[in-house]
């Protein structure tokens, strides 16, 4: 029963960080929300007894992809422009 509650909390965190990632107008904050979603997803994989997938998701999803996106944001404008 306790495992189901923890799974539910992690899944709600994944959904909340995904919604934040889509709705935030600050691109750096959206990249951090993406990293948080990836870390929560790797935690969920670990709890589902798939440690190899969890390690790959944490390394690639939260590590490498976030670093590349933050680097790209640093080379461009940080804020999304308003629609005309």
Image: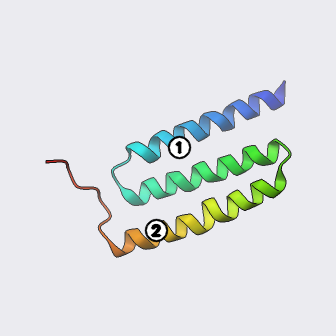
Q: Does residue 75 appear to the left or right of 2 in the view shown?
A: left
Q: How many marks?
A: 2
| Residue occupying image coordinates x 70% and y 30% | 8
**Mark 2 surroundings: few (<14), some (14-19) or many (≥20) residues within 10 A:** some
Q: Quadrant of residue 63?
A: bottom right
In front here: 56 or 30? 56
SS of the residue at dot 2? Answer: helix
Pointer 2 and pointer 1: residues touching (CB < 8 Å)? no
12 lies above or below 75: above
Q: Which residue is mark 1?
A: 17
| Residue occupying image coordinates x 29% and y 59% | 79
Query: Which residue is situated farthest in the top direction here?
Result: 1
SS of the residue at dot 1? Answer: helix
Mark 2 and mark 1: Cα distance apart in space: 17 Å
Q: Does residue 74 appear to the left or right of 10 in the view shown?
A: left
Q: Quadrant of the N terminus?
A: top right
- The label on residue 70 is 2
């Amino acid at each position: 029963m306790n495992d189901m509650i923890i799974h539910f909390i992690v899944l709600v965190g994944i959904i909340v960080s995904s919604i934040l990632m889509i709705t935030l107008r600050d691109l750096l904050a959206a990249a951090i929300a993406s990293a948080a979603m990836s870390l929560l997803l790797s935690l969920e994989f670990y709890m589902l007894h798939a440690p190899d997938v969890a390690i790959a998701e944490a390394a690639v999803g939260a590590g490498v992809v976030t670093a590349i996106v933050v680097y790209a944001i640093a080379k461009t404008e940080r804020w999304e422009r308003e629609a005309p």
